[in-house]
Image (cartoon, grey):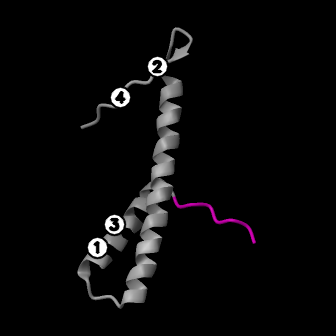
């Protein structure tokens, strides 16, 4: 059975937000809450991996004087 490709970062983050919202509601049976929690952990891992890969790509693009120089990202 071929392995499923993880969702895009944006899709994974939206799914993770939906899982968190549903868990915060507190109206789930225990087994369903555990299953959702496991899904959330999996989505979180995928998003983290994608962020790490993006960070590595940015570091490579910031080469200066033939060396990779990691610089912090200063977003909004």
Measuring from the top left, give residue 35's x and y in whole percent: 45, 80
The span from disc 4 to disc 1 (Cα, nearest Å) is 31 Å
Regarding mark 3 in the picture, which secondary structure is present there? helix
Q: Which quarter shows the N terminus?
A: bottom right
Q: Which residue is mark 4?
A: 72
Q: Which residue is mark 1?
A: 21
Figure check: 10 above or below 42: above
Regarding mark 1 in the picture, which secondary structure is present there? helix
The span from disc 1 to disc 2 (Cα, nearest Å) is 39 Å
Regarding mark 4 in the picture, which secondary structure is present there? loop
Numbered label tally: 4
Instruction: Tell me if mark 4 has few (under 14), some (14-19) or many (20+) residues whose alpha carbon lies within 10 angstroms of its own.
Output: few
Measuring from the top left, give residue 59's x and y in whole percent: 49, 27
Q: In this rendered view, identify the residue nearer to me: 55 or 76.
A: 55
- The answer to whether the residue labelled 2 contacts the one labelled 4, judged by CB atoms less than 8 Å apart, is no
Q: Which residue is mark 2?
A: 69
Which residues fall within the magenta stretch?
Answer: 1-7
The span from disc 3 to disc 4 (Cα, nearest Å) is 26 Å
Q: In this rendered view, identify the residue nearer to me: 55 or 8.
A: 55
- The answer to whether the residue labelled 3 contacts the one labelled 4, judged by CB atoms less than 8 Å apart, is no
- Of label 2 and label 3, which has the lower sequence position? 3
The span from disc 1 to disc 3 (Cα, nearest Å) is 6 Å
- Of label 4 and label 1, which has the lower sequence position? 1
The extreme right residue here reads 1
- The answer to whether the residue labelled 4 contacts the one labelled 1, judged by CB atoms less than 8 Å apart, is no
Q: Which residue is mark 3?
A: 17
- Of label 3 and label 4, which has the lower sequence position? 3
Q: Main secondary structure of the magenta part?
A: loop
Measuring from the top left, give residue 13's x and y in whole percent: 40, 60
Assess whether residue 49 is covered by the magenta stretch.
Answer: no
- Name which quarter of the figure residue 34 lies in: bottom left
């Amino acid at each position: 059975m071929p392995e499923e490709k993880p969702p895009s970062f944006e899709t994974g983050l939206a799914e993770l937000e939906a899982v968190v919202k549903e868990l915060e509601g507190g109206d789930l049976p225990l087994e369903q809450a555990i299953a959702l929690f496991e899904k959330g952990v999996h989505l979180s891992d995928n998003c983290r991996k994608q962020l790490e890969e993006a960070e590595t790509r940015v570091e490579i693009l910031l080469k200066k004087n033939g060396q990779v120089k990691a610089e912090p990202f200063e977003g909004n």
